[in-house]
Amino acid sequence: MVSLPDGAVGRADPDWSARRSDARRNHEQIMAAAIEVFSEKGLTATVTEVAARAGVGKATVYRSYPTKDALVQAVAEHQIRWVDARVAQAAAEEDPYLALRDFLDDLFQRLVHDPVLLAEVMPREELRAATTASLETLGRIVDAARDRGALRADVTALDVRILSTGCARALVDLGNRDPQVWRRFAGLVLAALGPTATSVRPD
Amino acid sequence: MVSLPDGAVGRADPDWSARRSDARRNHEQIMAAAIEVFSEKGLTATVTEVAARAGVGKATVYRSYPTKDALVQAVAEHQIRWVDARVAQAAAEEDPYLALRDFLDDLFQRLVHDPVLLAEVMPREELRAATTASLETLGRIVDAARDRGALRADVTALDVRILSTGCARALVDLGNRDPQVWRRFAGLVLAALGPTATSVRPD
DNA sequence: GCTTAACCGGACCTTGGGGTCCACTTCGAG
DNA sequence: CTCGAAGTGGACCCCAAGGTCCGGTTAAGC
């Protein structure tokens, strides 16, 4: 797992400077707690649980996020920022194929341990916009790798996302979070995207 | 979609001959209704909904299945029998690689349209036993294809299952049920399992 | 047709988790 | 220090969905 500078995942919401200091503090504790709790127990974790973890009353959570869904979404957006940063880093590397390979490894690790990223990002249309940035960057990596003949002609960044998320989810559903296993599947995904071997089976 | 003889998916529960005829009839209507409703609305569909579809009261459903979970599980087992039959058919074909290819196509179609098969089978340990049969048969197909050099050396039947279910799920999560798309992904899965092209990227 | 046991189904209970209210507390400006 | 506005949190409401009960109904043997 490549470590990223903390700032790379920084916050985004504006005008919190106007709020009272305790409110600001609570808001951040709630976010942190939500990330923890949802990552541990999955999306079924209760709001009360998040509040407890943050050392705060339920109502306080609802003041920051009007609904549980909004909270989940905020967490998802936060996690997406991690992906953004990681993709950007990959884009900065020299060899696009190797960058993609390493990215997939890290992505799998994240997916396998983060139910929100794994199961909430794909189905939410509200998050489509939030993911376009990283998809575009990823697209450039894919293009570069393809131009060097390392990937099949029709591969897109969305393919990468679908295959990765899908496999990771299936593994988690099976209860298998073994690093050896998900690393192997990261490899399989890469193989799926590889140049169509002038197949052993011509038809 | 290959059509299978109706008998291939037949029922299994014993001693229903002892029950009264209306009970038996209701029981079957409930099963049929459950398959329909869950396939349409997903697992969140309510028991009352299933009962209504079967033209029956809620309590009658609960007489056949003591809990909603049991009902879902029964549906899952039913759907698994379809897979069993389809795999058996594939095993009877001559060319294992082509058999696998066609099987994947049919499997994707099913998965994309059946939330129960898609999302309930993998996580349920109670169903592991029910799936071993088809996994073994599928394993023989995979072995045969691998022996002919059509698949990479370390492929297992479980890999096929994980990749297929995963991709299909990701597609459904994205709301994409376009045949062209899932067919393409069936191809990608097959590519992932294909012989490791003596890669363009040696390292 | 009559009887009875099996069966049915709508009314009812219960639980749990999302979401609100308001009396109390705390920040921080003057 | 004082005071008012912002903030807090536990008690409370609500309602959807799982699961039960019992008076009425019906299959089926005689």
Image: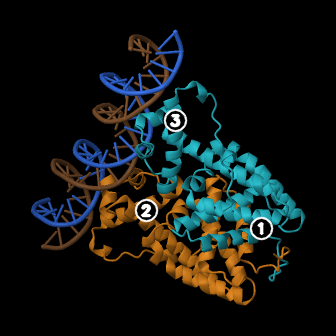
Chain colours: A cyan, B orange, C blue, D brown
Subunit that carries the residue with mark 1: A
Question: Does residue B126 sit above or below A62 in this rendering?
Answer: below
Q: In which quarter of the image is residue B103?
A: bottom right
Cα distance, mark 2 to mark 1? Answer: 36 Å
**Point 42% across, 54% down: residue:** B50
Q: Do labels 3 and 2 share a chain?
A: no
Cα distance, mark 1 to mark 3? Answer: 45 Å
Q: Do labels 2 and 1 share a chain?
A: no
What percent of the width, then of the height, locates residue D11? 28, 33
The answer to whether residue B37 shows anywhere in this view is: no
Label 1 close to label 3 by CB (< 8 Å): no
> Which of the pair D7/A158 is nearer the observer?
D7
Looking at marks 1 and 3 on the same chain, the residue that comes earlier in the sequence is marked by 3
Type of amino acid under label 3: Arg
Q: Is residue C18 left or right of residue A112?
A: left
Q: Which mark is residue B72?
A: 2
Read off the residue under disc 3: A25
